[in-house]
Amino acid sequence: EVRLVESGGGVIRPGGSLRLSCVTSGFSFANYGLSWVRQAPGRGLEWVSGISYGGDTTGYADSVKGRFTISRDNAKNSLFLEMDSVRVEDTALYFCARDYSTFEWLVKGIWFDPRGQGTPVTVSS
Amino acid sequence: QSVLTQPASVSGSPGQSITITCTGTHTDVGGFQYVSWYQQHPGTVPKLIIYEVTNRPSGISSRFSGSKSGNTASLTISALQAEDEADYFCSSFTSYATLVFGGGTSLTVL
C-alpha cells in the first residue's frame, strides 16, 4: 500500500524556521517526482515546491522562492521542506504528494495519499 | 505564476451535465497538454480525476471528461450524482517548470 505521511508542522513565530518531513512507503521512491502542496483554512490549493525523481531539478512557487528549500533522501524514502523566514501567510495545512506517473515530473498530475492528513503550520506572533 | 481562473461555484440537478472552466495563459494552460483536475470533498485530500487534459486515472468514472481550447481547459461531469458535490481544482504545468492551481470551484448538486 502506498503511503505518504507528513510531519514536522507546528506553531511558529514570523521569521522563524521549520522543517517538514514526508516519509513514504509502498512504491519505488527514486522513480517518482514529489511535491509539497498547501491549503490555507477554507482556501484553495497552492503548489509550494517540487523535486524531480532524480533530485536534480527543483521548482518553487514565487511566494516561497528564496525562503523554502525542498530536498529528498532516496535512502530513507523521505521528502523534506526546509521553511525559513516564515510569514503569517505561510499558515496552512501542508501535504506531500507524489507524481502520478514514474519518470515524469509534474506533467501527468500529482497523487495525494487518500489517508493523508497533512501537517499543519501556523505562523503567528 | 498567477492562479488559474475558475468560477467560484457551479450547480446542477441530478442527471444533468455541468462544465467547469479553467483559464490561464500561453505560459501554462495554453502552452502545454498538461492540465489536471482534482476533486476534493470536505475534510479529505484532493483526488486526481483527469490528467493530460483528457485522461482519467484508473478507477475514475467515465462521467468525468476533460478538454482544452486555447488558454481554457474544461471539466465536464455528466449524469450528475449527489456524490459529485465537492470542490474541483484545475492545475497546469508551466513554462517555469512549476505547477499552478486554479482557485477552485464549488459544485452544488441541487
Image: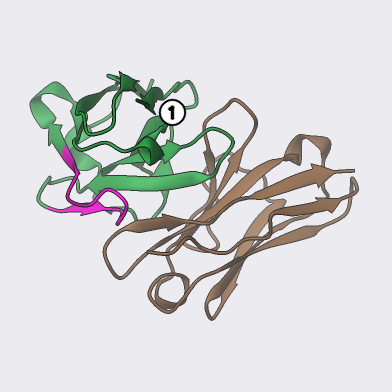
Please tell me which residue is depicted at 74% across the width and 40% down the height of the picture: B84
Please tell me which residue is depicted at 57% across the width and 50% down the height of the picture: B89
Magenta residues? A57-70
How many labels sit on residues? 1
Q: Position of residue B40 (x, y in %)?
A: 60, 37
Q: Position of residue A95 (x, y in %)?
A: 39, 32
Q: In the figure, is residue A90 to the left or right of B77?
A: left
Q: In the figure, is residue A96 to the left or right of A33?
A: right
Q: Which chain is brown?
A: B
Q: Assign a secondary structure to mark 1.
A: loop
Please tell me which residue is depicted at 24% across the width and 24% down the height of the picture: A21
Q: Position of residue B72 (x, y in %)?
A: 57, 73
Q: For mark 1, what is the residue?
A: A113
Q: Considering depth in this image, is A86 or B61 the residue closer to the camera?
A: A86
Q: Considering depth in this image, is B77 or A26 the residue closer to the camera?
A: B77
**In the image, residue B3 above or below residue A14:** below
Magenta stretch encompasses residue A59? yes
Res B61 → quadrant? top right
Give chain A's shade: green
Kind of residue at badge 1: Asp
The quadrant of the rendering that contains the N terminus of chain B is bottom left
